[in-house]
Image: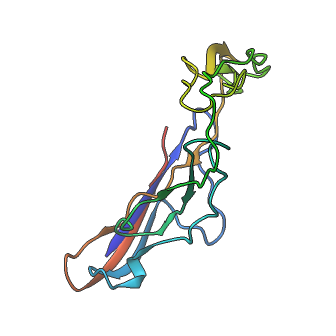
């Protein structure tokens, strides 16, 4: 047997996680065979995404593409991201990047109850780094604490499923997935 778990997270004086009809509780079980060739407990890569745009229009430049490992069981072999040099025909002048002005602070706190944060951002585009110029120093965002309501009533939410756990190391067994309600 292999299992997976999830937990009910975040409830405090609110409602415990609710289950809809046909939804498993906090534990799921499924049959599996401890074999790389057993598709019932296998994980597979999704197709590669499209290549991103090149990171620059002159000089050295790269592009990336990504994929996701889906399913349950062992990790997918190989990388989740690939990098590729972009063909660029012209050289760039060397320009160090400069920060734009800060955006206004976000008007809302990141939470509706309790301690949260507000953020503001800036871009390294005044001017944009080019050639062998240096990227801007410092972070592209800042945060500051904010306080929403002090007393909170929070309903619970299910945590993500745990990794697959099999009860046998060889032959057939049952896959089990467990979810827990978190306080």
Q: Position of residue 45 (x, y in %)?
A: 48, 70
Q: Position of residue 12 (x, y in %)?
A: 57, 33
Q: Considering depth in this image, is 7 or 79 the residue closer to the camera?
A: 79
| Above or below, 45 relative to 37 | above
Q: How is the image coloured?
A: rainbow
Q: Is residue 98 left or right of residue 45?
A: right
Q: Is residue 151 left or right of residue 179?
A: right
At x 34%, y 68%, the residue is: 74
Q: Considering depth in this image, is 104 or 161 the residue closer to the camera?
A: 104
At x 59%, y 50%, the residue is: 17
Total count of labels: 0
Q: Quadrant of residue 76?
A: bottom left
At x 58%, y 41%, the residue is: 59
Q: Quadrant of residue 151?
A: top right
Q: Is residue 126 left or right of residue 41?
A: right
Residue 113 in sight from this viewpoint: yes
Q: Considering depth in this image, is 46 or 125 the residue closer to the camera?
A: 125
Q: Is residue 52 left or right of residue 27?
A: right
Q: Position of residue 87 (x, y in %)?
A: 59, 55
Q: Residue furthest front?
A: 90
Q: Position of residue 128 (x, y in %)?
A: 68, 28
Residue 115 in sight from this viewpoint: no
| Above or below, 24 relative to 118 | below
Q: Considering depth in this image, is 64 or 80 the residue closer to the camera?
A: 64
- Quick one: quadrant of the N terminus? bottom left
| Above or below, 35 relative to 101 | below
């Amino acid at each position: 047997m292999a299992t997976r778990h999830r937990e009910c997270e975040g409830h405090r004086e609110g409602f415990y996680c609710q289950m809809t009809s046909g939804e498993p509780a906090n534990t799921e079980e499924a049959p599996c065979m401890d074999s790389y060739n057993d598709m019932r407990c296998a994980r597979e890569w999704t197709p590669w995404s499209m290549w991103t745009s090149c990171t620059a229009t002159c000089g050295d430049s790269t592009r990336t593409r990504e994929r996701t490992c889906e399913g349950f069981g062992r990790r997918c072999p190989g990388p989740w991201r690939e990098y590729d040099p972009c063909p660029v025909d012209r050289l760039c002048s060397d320009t160090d990047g400069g920060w734009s002005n800060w955006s206004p602070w976000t008007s809302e706190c990141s939470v509706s109850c309790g301690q949260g944060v507000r953020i503001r951002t800036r871009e390294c585009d005044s001017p944009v780094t080019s050639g062998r110029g240096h990227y801007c120093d410092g972070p592209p965002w800042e945060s500051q604490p904010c306080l929403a309501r002090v007393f909170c009533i929070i309903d619970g939410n299910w945590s993500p499923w745990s990794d697959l756990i099999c009860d046998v190391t060889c032959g057939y067994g049952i896959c089990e997935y467990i979810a827990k309600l978190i306080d």
